[in-house]
Amino acid sequence: MQIMKTSQKIKAYIFYLLFIFHLCNGEEAIDCSGRCACCIDEEFGCGTSPGIHGDTSCLKGSVDTIYGHRCKNPCRSNCLKCTQDIGECFACKPGFYGNLTNCVDSCSIRCIDGTCENDGRCTCIQNFEGNKCDTCVQGRYGDNCEHTCSIGCIGNTCNRNGSCSCLHNFNGQNCDVCAANYEGSACESCDDGFYGKYCSKSCILVDSNCLKCKRDDEYCMKCKNGYFSSNGNCVECGINCLERKCDPTNGRCTLGCKAGFWSDICDANCNLNCSSCGQFSNGRIYITSSTNTALAALVGLFATLFMCTAAGCYLWNRRRSKPKENNSEIQLDQPETERAYEQLQRQTSEPTYRDVDANYTVLPM
Ligand SMILES: *[C@@H]1O[C@H](CO)[C@@H](O)[C@H](O)[C@H]1NC(C)=O
Ligand SMILES: *[C@@H]1O[C@H](CO)[C@@H](O)[C@H](O)[C@H]1NC(C)=O
Ligand SMILES: *[C@@H]1O[C@H](CO)[C@@H](O)[C@H](O)[C@H]1NC(C)=O
């Protein structure tokens, strides 16, 4: 009988425990099993409330997520704070918002610290914006707003995939290539050969021989081969330019002048009696060409040396071969050889080219 009594007691106790458990549905995360464990200030915030007989009550309320007097009930779902009596939620856990009945909405993962206001608004992390931080700030795109819209996008705005409407000088899905006739890192200038506000006019309209012209002026800056730009027009290289070739920017004859002419553009005559002169000599220096002059000087030098040596040997031999002859003969002979020697010297030292510098006249250009 004693045993039966004990088992009945145990049964009753277990039933009681189950009943309590059913009512309280205790939460795993917070252990409220100790006395007043889940009251604010624990023992010090714990006491008897009028009207709740023989019960321990949390006089200052329960810790977050818990409500009730002795059941220590968890607040519903994502609720952080709920009323002591019936557990009505009045604040959601960090990271949640919305209907306080369940705080079922999550703050955007792009909210700084993951927290948001009751309406879900928050301060967004870098490059994101919008009530739910689900759009990129202007000028950015990509899942993480990590890309910048192309500079060719109108208004610096683009779609999620980077596509946009292009400025007139850009082209392509993402407006990242230059439109036809445009060039430059920002497609800011016209391709060679085009001009006008929209780089749509051909420089041929400025001059049929023009390769490159000013963008907003009918002015040719670069002409095709054989021409040069003079005041914005293409002028043929001078007729006295060798091979008719000249610097396309200023017309200077690049290969020199035809014989008889000089100056940058070979339009000046060499001085009188001068058949050929240096391009930049003011018509004076008499040359055929620089290589010929050097060659002539070298040949002249060797010829002189050779003749002097020959004359010297001749004289010496004459003296040696006629040692017994009398002085008169030798004296007769000497002037003769000296004359020959002098003549040779005159011949070799006579200038190959005449210096006309003495009385030149600079011709008007
Ligand atoms: C909150 O949710 C509950 C249950 O889903 C619903 O009955 C109630 O109308 C909602 N309140 C608001 C303000 O939406
Ligand atoms: C990019 O997005 C725009 C607008 O959302 C769409 O029209 C276009 O087809 C997309 N382009 C690609 C390559 O997916
Ligand atoms: C050019 O040659 C002629 C005849 O040889 C001569 O009379 C004249 O003085 C020369 N002129 C110059 C500038 O050397």
Image (cartoon, grey):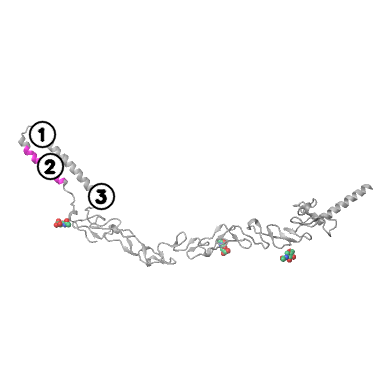
Per the rendering, the mark at residue 350 is: none
Residue drawn where x is 21% and y is 45% of the image? 299
177 shown above or below 316: below
297 shown above or below 162: above
Mark 1 touches mark 3? (CB < 8 Å): no
Q: In which quadrant will I find the C terminus?
A: bottom left
Q: Provide residue 288's location: percent of width, then percent of height.
A: 23, 53
Residue drawn where x is 13% and y is 38% of the image? 314
Secondary structure of the residue carrying tag 1 is helix
| Mark 1 or mark 3: whose residue is earlier in sequence | 3
Q: What whole-number distance in Å separates the C-alpha atoms at marks 1 and 2?
A: 19 Å
Q: What whole-number distance in Å separates the C-alpha atoms at marks 1 and 3?
A: 45 Å
Amino acid at dot 2 = Tyr
The span shown in magenta is: 331-348
Q: What whole-number distance in Å separates the C-alpha atoms at marks 3 and 2?
A: 31 Å
Q: Please indicate, yes or no, whether residue 37 appears anywhere in the rendered image.
A: no
Depth check: give the residue in front, 161 or 28.
28
Per the rendering, the mark at residue 321 is: 1
| CA neighbours of label 1 inside 10 A, class few (<14), some (14 to 19), many (20+) | few
| CA neighbours of label 2 inside 10 A, class few (<14), some (14 to 19), many (20+) | some
Secondary structure of the residue carrying tag 3 is helix
Q: Which residue is mark 3?
A: 291
Residue drawn where x is 19% and y is 54% of the image? 357
Q: Provide residue 311's location: percent of width, then percent of height.
A: 14, 40
